[in-house]
Amino acid sequence: MSEQSRRPHRPAKPYRRPQKDPVRILAFEALRAVDERDAYANLVLPPLLRKAREKEGPEKFDARDAALATELVYGTLRRQGTYDAVIAACVDRPLREVDPPVLDVLSLGAHQLLGTRIPTHAAVSASVELARVVLGDGRAKFVNAVLRKVAQNDLDGWLEKVAPPYDEDPEDHLAVVHSHPRWVVSALWDSLGGGRAGIEDLLEADNERPEVTLVARPGRATTDELLLEEAAVPGRWSPYAVRLTEGGEPGAVEAVREGRAGVQDEGSQLVALALANAPLDGPDRAWLDGCAGPGGKAALLGALAAERGAVLLASEKQPHRAGLVAKALDGNPGAYQVIAADGTRPPWRPGTFDRVLMDVPCTGLGALRRRPEARWRRRPEDLENFAPLQRALLRTALDSVRVGGVVGYATCSPHLAETRAVVADVLKQYPDTELVDARPLLPHVPALGDGPDIQLWPHMHGTDAMYLSLIRRTA
């Protein structure tokens, strides 16, 4: 009798169908959309959650499921750079050779292991089950092996292994520890003006989940009305701001559904308020928002203009975004007009307006809390691509304002190449202008910089890193 025939017969292991986890499957789908379609999580996630809530049966989401899915998506995107460094130390090939869907599952697993309180065994087993469902059994084994290695250290332990010492390479150290591309770390550091504590506070603030901030549009809603909502507290700086401290669902707020209030970061509100409060020489009847989409600042400016009997013209190049502006302004208590027009070739006559806001397209490095994927999508060369447009739009704004009127140049980026460099460069061509000190216009807001312009910061003000320069035409 052969040795093989003497071995006892072992029945084959019965096939076990992978267990579907609706929360993690949804998180995986959101990450794939961000990766494959260059989508933004804040646009992809809400419809996915809405669809999951509408389902019947075991896959129907409750509030806890939605909160976990949201944390998995945003947490993974915010810490992607750190998790990539950890995963790279646990695989035997360059990360670029790992299939993107596999890397998404690994990143979700790494976040559960290193960035949440989910128990280790649950984080690994749930990730492996997700891999079986979306990738197949073969690649699930690879996921299992890698995540077991990841689980051997906590986050601090891994950072000691994968981040270079600060003294040897401070920018790369900060890039790995705080999960930002090195060039972004360098640019933000330059904008802050040096010092380790400030840059670490800023990078850490970029990785925190921002509160939902509402704006009560004057003449249409009040902060008292919004403060009746659960977990609502007053804004820090804007008299029209209300914060939902527990993340609340804005769509559940009646005033938001009716368009009388909106979701708007407090930094954006402050930019509109500073422009509206800037002193003028002469009449105050015609206002322009020259890059009005998607409409948040235009709606606030329109309401403030209405209180003074002024008329707002809101111009937006993209027709579909102009439609969003019209929706935001619908119901404004005063006169306004919305048009689809190229701000670099304006259809209005020069010197038409008393106040002009030009919130120009930019890299968005000031909104990395709300759009964490933007930090991985942007490249240094994007600055060069935006530069001609930013300068052209500021020239349009200066041509459009009358003598004695004021222009507000704003960006949602603190990068010096998108802020002070643009203003300084354009004003060389406009000698009949002067910079207005914007800081006294926001008297209750501290740490606005050396002036005369304003730079807001997430770690100092709890807002996006909005920039504003106010310029008056003198002749």
Image (tube, grey):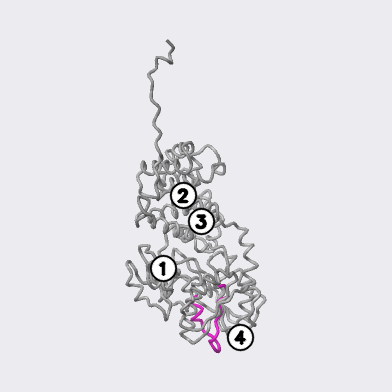
Identified by mark 3, the residue type is Glu
* Along the line of sight, the residue nearer the viewer: 104 or 26: 26
x, y percent for residue 222 = 38, 77
Specify the quadrant that holds the C terminus. Answer: bottom right
Residue that numbered label 1 is attached to: 213
| Cα–Cα gap, marks 2 and 1 | 27 Å
| Horizontal side of residue 63 vs 465, given as left or right | left
Lower position in the chain sequence, tag 2 or tag 4 = 2
Extent of the magenta region = 272-291
Whether tag 2 and tag 1 are in contact, CB under 8 A, the answer is: no
Q: Looking at the image, is mark 2 or mark 4 nearer the viewer?
A: 2
| Cα–Cα gap, marks 1 and 4 | 36 Å
| Cα–Cα gap, marks 3 and 1 | 21 Å
Whether tag 3 and tag 2 are in contact, CB under 8 A, the answer is: no
- In the rendered structure, find residue 28 and report the number of the disc placed on it: 2
Q: In percent of the image, x 32 and y 72: which residue is there?
A: 228
